[in-house]
Image: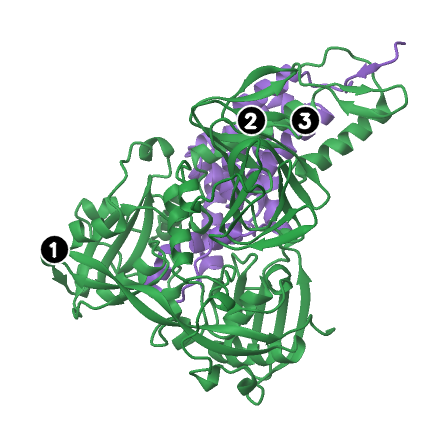
Amino acid sequence: MKPDERNIDELLKHALPSAPRDQMEAALDRVHGRLKSDSQPRVVEPDGSSETSRIRSWRPVIRVAAAAAVVVAAVWGAASLRNHGVYAVLEAADGSLYRINDGRRIPVHVGDRIAAQETIRSNDADGAVIALADGSHIELRSMAELSWDHAVDGLAIRLDTGTIIVSAARQSGRRVYVRTKDVSVALNGTTLLVDTAKDGSRVGVIDGEGDVREGKTETKLRPGQQVTTSVTLAPRPLIEGIAWSRNADPYRRILESFARGMAQTAGQLQPLNSASPAPALQGRASAAGPQFEEASIKPCDPDNVPPAPPGARGGGANSFYMSPGRTYVLCMTLATIIRTAYNYGPYEMLNSDTSIGPAGRGLSTGPVYGLGVEDGRRVRGGPDWIRQERYTIEAVAEGASDGAAMSGPMLRALLEKRFRLKAHVETEEAPAFDLIVARSGLKIKPVDMSACEAGPPPDVPAIRIRRTFKDVRNGQKPNCGLGIQANGPNRVLVGGAATLQGLANALGGPLGLGVRVFDKTGIADRFNFVLEVLDETPPERRIVLPDPDNHPETTADVPPAANIFSGIEEQLGLRLVPSKASRPFVVIDQIQRPSAN
Amino acid sequence: MSSVAVFRRPSEPLAEDLEDAFREHSRLVYRTAYSVTGSAQDAEDVVQTLFLQLLRRGFPPAFKQNPKGYLYRAAVNLSLNAVKSGKRRASAGDPEQLEIADSRPDVHDADAKDDLQARLVAAIAQLNPRAVEMLILRYEHDTSEAEIGRLLGTSRAVVAVTLFRARARLKKLLTP
């Protein structure tokens, strides 16, 4: 084999996408179920209406051809198979879950489908998790009984009795409704607890926002807030109400962080100062600066994302890409676009200090950035639609403007012009951590750059064989820099001649703390290390990481590692201690839907 | 006729045969589609589309002659269509969960493999479908050149030459 061909050979061996087995088996089960349904006989009523018979067998029993009805059934089947919300699946169960049919209890097994309007009940000891086809999840506590059905603009969950936690997927124009006998809640990208009993119902929001309707009264709930429909229901802290959940810890952390004022709305926070600390960030200040010459702004459906622009491989909803002189915003909420224009990124640790991250450097041309969705921390005020409606923007600058200008002042000027945006910046105090050396002393030794495996030069095809944490533990050099991999329930951060500043940044963002971490060690040396900690990221913020084994059977037995606080002390001799950081945020004063292109 | 008429689709194949085919070959189809598209969602769509066609249209002669070869080829073609349609989402599941925004090279390294895979998927989509069939068999299914030849009805030499050319083409496509 020729030398240059060997690289491609290696690349194909290592980088060709390989299906995770559990994902594959789950997908095949789903497809099998749909095919099975599709092959069932249809019952035709004399008046011509039809309905799907109950599933009885794979082989149809009576062969009476009805060509027209076959066509109708095939069209119905094809449409329904690809439609949202046509089924639900039992994803996990601690014990037994039953479907109630004519008063009989029929066990439901993991992977089984749950049809619309079927009544489902968890047993008296254990809970279960049901996945809906739109990506939403319902976690049932023991003794809960519910059914789900289609709604005009989404799905509706009817909770007859018991307690559930619903994590509603964020969707454009669609909602998940949770209804009890006396209350209805509309959700979009929301996690909330609903508890209903004989006396009434209790609804509490864990994350996101929920619109609660009780009779003619409508209430918007935010994280940590709850309502009850009966005075006989004793007030109970929401944190206690979620203790039974398998995600209790992540939910507790979200609630605690919101309680500390980390992510409340502007009205409930007390800004440290109301004037902008940085004139350059003022919306009006950008008007006189460089501007885009042409711009196209179109509403976007996140379920039907337009193709990524040429050269922007891997783009999807919420992605942001720039080439010299051109900017593409792909299906982002306006709040996220505003956040980007003000140079605030999705992670606190990137942006609360202008010396690092996008706030200091701006985004650059070339990479496709996944910018997530603004969650209320960085953009406050303004109408709800700025957090719900998505836009795709293509803007062209005169000459080859650089990324920092286009993603910052020029994007702000575009928003001011087309969306009539007026905004100002305020700051608040936010939780943070300091990274310091533990009392036991540093447990890693300084290295120089020769201790890590440098990547290929830029003019060579990107055939970089990634060293896994297992390779490094077996004595091989790590790749230079920081890389994160999954190992069963854990996350493994591999450092190759990495600085503690880099480690602090990774701890704050990708490794899961979600707040700024300051390197206060005073150590400028570089280190090789492998840090394995339990992945405690809330499910809705979890990032899929490469797993070097990629086979569930090899990682299923991996024991949970220590949490991030214990792990960093035990493995590296470092400590995280709570501190505070100043965090700016944008307050919308005025905004309107865009003018025509 | 009674007041309720029950019918079934009259066409072949018999459901048991389809069940057997699904049990035997669906993993091959899924893994192939996943490797070509890099997307779990697309892979699931490919499996579903392929077997739904068989359910509704019956088994074509080519399937009866060589079920595995037919399904494999169909999987590659459907997958290439999916990639070229440009309608893939960023990833399966909630795209908002999957995105890391960070321009710094050190943290960005964590995404290097995903990025490389995305580029590889895009490059493979530009190859001749026949070359893609051989490439995926060779590198995803770890099939020998002789076995590839048998499965796809060609000689080992043709497989070797096609793979060589495919690798050369990939190198060109992946070189900045």
Q: Is residue A484 above or below residue A377?
A: above
Same subunit: marks 3 and 2 = yes
Q: Residue at x 27, y 67 (%)?
A: A518
Query: Where is residue A570 shown, x and y percent of the image?
Result: 16, 49
Query: Where is residue A569 shown, x and y percent of the image?
Result: 17, 53
A143, A574: nearer the viewer: A143
Q: How many marks?
A: 3
Seen as rendered, the residue at the extreme bottom is A288
Q: Is residue A354 above or below residue A494?
A: below
Three-letter residue code for mark 2: Lys
Which residue is label 2 attached to?
B68
Three-letter residue code for mark 3: Leu
In green, which chain? A
Q: Which mark is residue B54?
A: 3
Which residue is label 1 attached to?
A443
Marks 2 and 1 sit apart, C-alpha to C-alpha, by 55 Å
Mark 1 vs mark 3: give the one in front: 1
Query: Where is residue A563 shown, x and y percent of the image?
Result: 26, 47
Chain B is which colour? purple
User: Around disc 3, counting alpha carbons within 10 Å, would you say few (fewer than 14), some (14 to 19), or many (20 or more)?
Assistant: some
Query: Where is residue B59 shown, x and y percent of the image?
Result: 68, 23
Three-letter residue code for mark 1: Lys
Where is residue A258, by image quadrant? bottom left
- Please state, as top left, top right, bottom left or bottom right, where the C terminus of chain A lies in the image: bottom right
Q: Residue at x 41, y 52 (%)?
A: A254
Q: Chain of mark 1?
A: A
B156, A234: nearer the viewer: A234
Mark 2 vs mark 1: give the one in front: 1
